[in-house]
Amino acid sequence: MLQGLVDYIQHWGALTVRGVNAVGDITLFATRIFRWLFVAKPAPDTILPSFYAVGVLSLPVVALTGTFIGMVLAVQSIGQFRSIGMESRLGAVINYSLVRELGPVLAATMLAGRVGSAMAAVLGTMRVTEQIDALVAMGANPIHHLVVPRFLACVLLIPALTVMADFMGIVGGYFFSVNVLRIDHSQYLRNSRDFVGGFDLFCGIFKSIFFGAIIAIVSCYRGFHCQSGAEGVGKAATAAFVLSFVLILILDLMLNILLDGVATILWPRGNRLF
Amino acid sequence: MAREESEGSKELQSDSLVELKGVTLRFGSQTILDRIDLEIPRGQTLVVIGESGCGKTMLLKVMIRLIDPTLGEVYFDGKLLRSLGDVELTALRQRMGFVFQNAALFDSMTIGQNVAFPLRLKEGLDLAQTRRMVLDRLAEVGLPDNVYEKRPNQLSGGMRKRVGLARALMLEPDLVLYDEPTTGLDPIMSDVINELMMRTRAKRSVTSVIVTHDMHTARKVADRVVMLYPLSRVRSGESQILFDGPPDQLDQSSDRRVRQFVDGQAGDRLMEMRRAREVGDLETPNLLDQMQD
C-alpha cells in the first residue's frame, strides 16, 4: 500500500520534472532563435525555399478548407436562425466567426499539419543522419541556418494565409447561403458589413502571428531533439503537430481574453467578457 | 615535449595539435569514456580502434566540441575548447575537417553546393571561383566534373564518402577527423579511401584522427594506433585506452584482449574478401592473396 503510494508520487514527480525541463528547454531554444534573428541576416538561398514551402505551397489547401468551412457554417447555423426568423443575420455570424476565430485557427492548423510536421521530419532526419552535426563542424550555426528562415516564413506569411482563409470562407458562406439556402443577398451583405469591423480583422491577423511563431518553434524544437531512427523521426513529426495544435488553442484563449480587454478599453460601452 | 600552462589552463604551450586531459563522457548514469588522456602531435595519423559501441565516435565529437565532455579538458592548438565563445569556436572549427560515417551530405543541395558549403563563410569569392575550387577538390578525390550537379542520393556510398572528404578538405584544415571511413564499403573501395587518406596526409601534412574497426585501414595508414576498450563487458562504454603505439606493435602485444580484437577483425576482413571473390565483386583478387600472406 505504502510502496504503491511512493511509486505513484515518484511517477508524477518524474513527469513534473520532465515537463519543467521540457518547458525550460523550449524556452531556451526560442531565446536562441530570437537572438539569431538580430545577430545575422539569413542567406537568401535558405530563406526563399522556406517562404515558398510555407506560403506558396500552403495557399491552395488553406483556400480550399476555408471555402468549405464557410459553407459548413452556413449549413450548421441555418436551422437555428430559421427557427427564430433571423436567417438574414446568417452572414454576420459566418463572417464574424471566420474573421475572429476560424480563419486564423484553421490557417494555423493547416500550417501545423502541412508545414510543421514536415519541418520536424526534415530537421529530425538531418539530426539522425548527422547533417546538423556536419553544419556545426563546418562552423555554421544550425539555429541561424535552419531555424531562423523557417521561423520568419511562418511568422511573416501566416497573416497572408489567414486573410486567404477568411476571404475564401466568406465567399464560400455567401455562395452557399445565397444560391443554395436562398437568403436575400443584399440583407446578407448588409448584416455582414454591420457586424464585422476592422478590429475583428486585426484580431484574427494579430493572433495568427503568434500561432505562426508557435508552429515554427515547436516543430523545429521537436526536429532538433529527435530520437534516432525512422521511428524517432515519425514520433517527432507527430509530436510537433499535436503540441503545436494544443498550444495554438491555449494561446487562442489567452489572446482572445487579452484582445477583449483591449476592446473594452477602446470602446468602454461594448460587451465585456468579465 | 615542451609544455606550459597559462591563464588558468585556457592556453597550453604544447607541440601537440590536439590534447585530451582526463576526458570523461557520461550520458545520464552511463559512462561512455572514462578518463581519457591523449596527445596527438602535429602531422601524425592516429587511428583509434575498438569494438562497436566503445565510444570511438564520441571521442571524435569531443575533439571538435560537438559534445562537451562531462569532465576533463580538450585543447586544440593550445586553446581550451571549453573556454571559447561562439565566434572563436567557429573560427577554430574552420581549421578542422570532419568526414562523417555516412558522409552527412545535405540532401537538399547538389554535390557542388555541398562541397562549396564551407566557403560560404569566406568573403570575396565569386561563383566562378567557387565552382573552380569545388571542381579542383572533387578531382583531387577522384570524382569527375559531372557529379557537380548531382544530388547525394544519386551517388554510391563510396562516392558519397569521397564527396564528404572533398568537403572536409575545402578549407585546407590542420586536422581531419574521419569517422569509420571504410565501413560499409567493399574492399576495393576501402582501399581507394585508404589511398586518399594517405595522399591527403602526404600532400597537405595534415594531422589525422581515424576512427575505425578495420584493421587493414589501421595497418595501412596509421603512424600510431590507440585501442579503446570498455572496462565492463556487461554494458558498453566506460572505455579506456588499452593499447597505444605504432601499428606493427599490435601483433606483438601480449594483452589477450588486443590479440582477440586484432585477430577477429583480420579474420572478418578475410571472410568478407572471400565472399566478394565468390560472387565476383572483387576485381583484384591479388588483394586477397596479400591478406592471406
Image (cartoon, coloured by chain):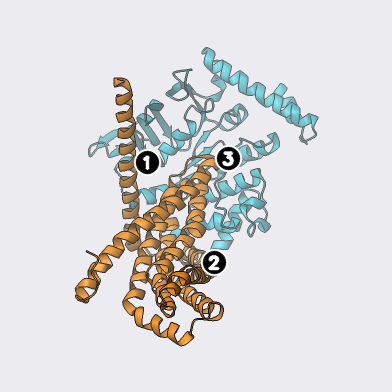
Chain colours: A orange, B cyan
Quick one: quadrant of the N terminus of chain B?
top left
Q: Secondary structure at mark 1?
A: loop
Front one among A161 and A34: A161
Q: Nearer the viewer, residue B10 or A91?
A: A91
Pick the quarter of the image with the C terminus of chain B: top right
Percent coordinates x, y for residue A61 in the rendering: 54, 66
Reply above or below: A220 against B185: below
Instruction: Determine which residue is flagged by label 1.
Output: B77
Give the number of the disc on residue B197: 3
Q: Amino acid at mark 1?
A: Asp
* Residue closest to the eye, A271 or A236: A271
Residue at 56% across / 58% down in the picture? B113
Return the chain for callout 2.
Answer: A
Looking at the rendered structure, whether the residues under marks 3 and 2 are on a common chain is answered as no
In the displayed structure image, the side of residue B283 where residue B139 appears, left or right: left
Chain to which mark 3 belongs: B
Judge the density around disc 2: few (<14), some (14-19), many (≥20) Cα neighbours within 10 Å: some
Position of A153 with respect to B99 (left or right) is: left
Q: Is residue A140 visible?
A: no
Q: Return the disc, 3 or 1, that comes first in the chain's sequence.
A: 1
The residue that label 2 is drawn on is A61
In terms of image quadrants, where is residue B266? top right
Position of residue B219 in the picture relative to residue A42 (left or right): right
The residue carrying pointer 3 sits among few (fewer than 14), some (14 to 19) or many (20 or more) residues within 10 Å by Cα, namely many
Of helix, strand and loop, which one carries label 3?
helix
Amino acid residing under circle 2: Val
The image quarter in which residue B32 lies: top left
- 3D distance between C-alphas at marks 3 and 1: 22 Å
